[in-house]
Amino acid sequence: MKQKLFVLCMSAALLLAGCGGGAMAGSTAASSAPSTPGAPSGEFQESWGGENYWDMGGADFAPAEPDIPLGEAESGSVYQNTRAKLIRRAELSIQTEQFDQSEAALNQLVDSCGGYFETSSRYGGSWRDVNANRNGEYTVRVPAEKYSQFVTSAGDLGYVTSINETSEDVGEAYYDTEARLKTQRTKQERLLALLERAETMEDIIALENALSDVEYQIEQYSSTLNRYDALIGFATFNIYLNEVNRVTQEVGETASLGARMAAGFQASFRGLGQGFQNFLIWASYNIFLLVILAAAAVVAVIVGKRELDKRNGKGDKKGEQEHP
């Protein structure tokens, strides 16, 4: 009986000692916790069920990971991922023999796709050289869902000599920015609630400074998301429209020998005809010089003929004297 009583007494003593040690440890931890300069004091330190914004040093909460199904992220092409955020761009070089008609067709195509011109530039065909070949450079923004339609219809503008397409998935950066924005808005709500309950001027100033920093971050993240949305929602096309005298399709190395030789003969005849035309154009610009040269050539021929006749006449007379 005495042994049982002794055991009970020892257990009670150990239990009391453990409770006392826990209380002392708690008070020691509370007293040693660093205080944040400019942070509100009093009841605001214990608000929101023990959560303290100021103990977190104003740092961002851990951003929530976007719920991206692993099956979609790992299997198939990126275009099949519904969570992908694609920025699509394309560059097209187009040759045309009818510049005005092609430019009008481009305007109509942009309107039918619901897009707009970001920039538009034209070169050539000036007042001094009206008949010079013209070139146009255009930056067009088209809704992303109309991307394929625009690329397919671009072949109607002329002969497409080259096309370069790129896609950039900014989903990771987009969702990270979105999560940070959500965190900052949560902070803003908590700070506004604390500001309504603040009583001292020190607490009000500290909370307003914190709100100013949070609002700045919200503005930055919102601007980044808006820029991403604009680039994702509208594809960008850089179009180079070049006017040429004749649109020709070169015969590649995979063509037959006969086709390549025929293309060579055709190119030779076209080159000969083009060279003759260039000569006539040069002659029209230098007609007075050609007239002077022609007159000088005629005079030289006449003078030379007279001199030759004189020499021949002298030779004949000399021969007659030697043979009476």
Image: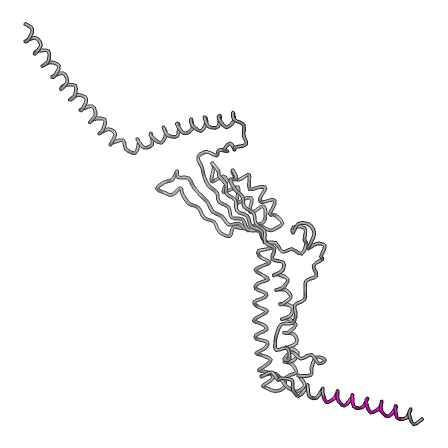
Q: Position of residue 315 (x, y in %)?
A: 10, 13
Compared with residue 298, is residue 15 higher up or lower down, i.e. above or below? below
Residue 217 position by quadrant? bottom right
Rendered residue at 58%/61% (across/down):
226
Q: Is the magenta stretch mostly helix, strand or loop?
A: helix
Quarter occupied by the N terminus: bottom right
Specify whether 137 is left or right of 44.
Answer: left
Specify whether 247 is left or right of 191.
Answer: left
Residue 307 position by quadrant? top left
Find the magenta span and give its range.
Answer: 6-24
Q: Position of residue 202 (x, y in %)?
A: 58, 85
Q: Position of residue 191 (x, y in %)?
A: 63, 77
Rendered residue at 70%/61% (across/down):
67
Quarter occupied by the C terminus: top left
Compared with residue 209, is residue 107 higher up or lower down, i.e. above or below? above
Specify whether 77 is left or right of 315.
Answer: right
Q: Which residue lies furthest to the bottom in this view?
A: 2
Rendered residue at 45%/37% (across/down):
244
